[in-house]
């Protein structure tokens, strides 16, 4: 029967609620779909623009103007005075040769406790293969290292002074498997930074990432670890010692790289050796760099990395050195040192042997003496 007076009968309350839910769900799905399309379009547009723009080669500094002519008190009418030659035009800058052909710049004279006076690197022979396997747009670098090894300072130094393309960044804050985790975790573990990086679950292709492994002198690394162990679980005797790691170098330690993945090592020297050995024996391209070189010769370290990546290094006048103030680069928390303090501390050869007895040094020599990077980086100086 039709309602009197042509009045409309309201739908039951349950039907209206159900209808409202359906409209809300459809609206939310449409909004999510639009957001995903916009995110994909912005990602695609960003990479397309990078590919189309020319490489931004650092401009050479302008040539200095010739000095003004000196006023001379001699008479103007000097007999047979030779005419002044016109100043020569500044020569044109030659095109920069590819990284593999660049001659190695002579290292500036310096004084360090390892008596090398040069920047040392392991793995440069694999750089050409890394560049050949990865277009410049896809190349990335990422720091790796044990705790207290200045991984952040290395990342900032290369990021600020090496340019691969005009726009976009080619750095990762850490290797995809975690900068402090062992190299054997590569391809078997994904750091949270990348597993939760975006809705699209983007992660870099492993072969396109060049690990920059920073290595610190074990004699200075072990006391730093005693002060700030982070995930390293020291032996109780080491925790109670005011001269840690002495006299308990032979005590076992463990490292909680993840809450559910704790690895055990025979001693602190064994941890240092075994962790770096995995990168030293790795078959893929990687660079192993000295932490001390980053302090004594940051430009040399940045040049080594930039050449390997195939990038352009900042001009000397534009080079940014990290660690100019306390809290930026060299250390953590109250152990942090500004660049000036770090140079004074790590440049003093006697500081390496503080808190080490002869028996301690003999133990280090026995544990690390046959490890190639320990000898190559001159960490065996004064130990064996």
Image (cartoon, grey):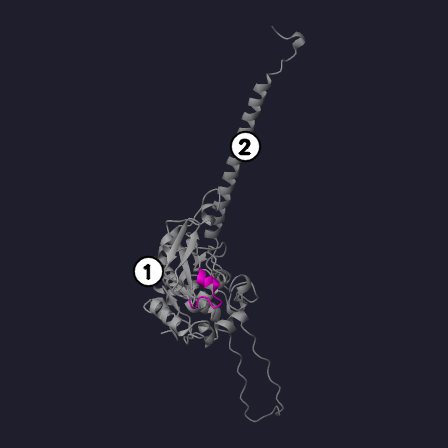
Residue displayed at 42% across by 74% down: 114
Residue 19 on the magenta segment: no
Residue 190: x, y in percent? 42, 49
The residue most toward the right is 5
Residue displayed at 46% across by 48% down: 192
Q: Is residue 352 above or below residue 262?
A: below
Circle number at residue 281: 1
Residue 273: x, y in percent? 37, 63
Provide the residue span drawn in magenta: 236-247
Q: Residues within 10 Å of mark 2 (few under 14, many from 20)?
A: few
Residue 223 appears anywhere in the view: yes
Residue toward you, 195 or 320: 195
Residue 16: x, y in percent? 58, 20
In the picture of the structure, the residue carrying the numbered disc 2 is: 28
Question: Mark 2, mark 1: which one is toward the viewer?
Answer: 1
- Locate residue 148 relative to residue 371 in the image: left or right: right
Does label 2 or label 1 sit earlier along the sequence? Answer: 2
Q: Secondary structure at mark 2?
A: helix
Residue toward you, 362 or 22: 362
- Measured in 3D between alpha carbons, the distance from the residue under mark 2 to the one under mark 1, in whole angstroms, is 52 Å
Q: Residues within 10 Å of mark 1 (few under 14, many from 20)?
A: few
Residue toward you, 285 or 133: 285
Residue 239 on the magenta segment: yes
């Amino acid at each position: 029967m039709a309602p009197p007076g042509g009045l409309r009968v309201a739908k039951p309350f349950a039907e209206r609620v159900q209808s409202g839910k359906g409209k809300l769900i459809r609206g939310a799905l449409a909004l999510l779909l639009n957001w995903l399309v916009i995110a994909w379009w912005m990602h695609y547009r960003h990479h397309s623009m990078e590919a189309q723009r020319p490489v931004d080669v650092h401009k050479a500094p302008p040539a200095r103007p010739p000095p003004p002519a000196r006023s001379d008190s001699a008479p103007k009418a000097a007999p047979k005075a030779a005419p002044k030659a016109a100043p020569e035009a500044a020569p044109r800058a030659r095109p920069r040769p590819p990284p593999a052909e660049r001659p190695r710049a002579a290292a500036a004279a310096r004084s360090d406790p390892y008596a090398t006076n040069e920047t040392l690197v392991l793995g440069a022979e694999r750089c050409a293969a890394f560049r050949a396997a990865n277009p410049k747009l896809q190349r990335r670098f990422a720091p790796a290292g044990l705790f207290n090894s200045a991984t952040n300072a290395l990342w900032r130094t290369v990021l600020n002074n090496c340019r691969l393309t005009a726009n976009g960044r080619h750095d990762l804050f850490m290797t995809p498997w975690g900068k402090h985790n062992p190299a054997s975790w590569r391809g078997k573990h994904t750091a949270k930074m990348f597993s939760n990086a975006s809705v699209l679950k983007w992660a870099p292709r492993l072969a396109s990432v060049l690990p920059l492994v920073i290595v610190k002198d074990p004699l200075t690394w072990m006391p730093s670890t005693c002060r700030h162990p982070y995930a390293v679980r020291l032996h109780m005797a080491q925790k109670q010692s005011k001269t840690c790691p002495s006299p308990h170098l032979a005590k076992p330690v463990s490292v909680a790289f993840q809450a559910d993945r704790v690895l055990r090592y025979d001693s602190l020297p064994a941890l240092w050796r075994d962790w770096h050995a995995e990168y030293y024996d790795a078959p893929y391209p990687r660079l192993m760099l000295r932490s001390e070189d980053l302090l004594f010769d940051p430009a040399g370290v940045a040049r080594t990395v930039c050449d390997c990546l195939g990038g352009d290094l900042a001009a000397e006048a534009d080079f940014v050195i990290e660690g100019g103030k306390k809290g930026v680069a060299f250390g953590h928390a109250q152990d942090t040192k500004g660049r000036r303090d770090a140079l004074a501390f790590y440049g003093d050869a006697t500081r390496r042997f503080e808190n080490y007895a002869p028996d301690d040094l003999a133990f280090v020599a026995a544990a690390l003496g046959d490890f190639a990077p320990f000898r190559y980086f001159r960490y065996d100086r004064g130990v064996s």
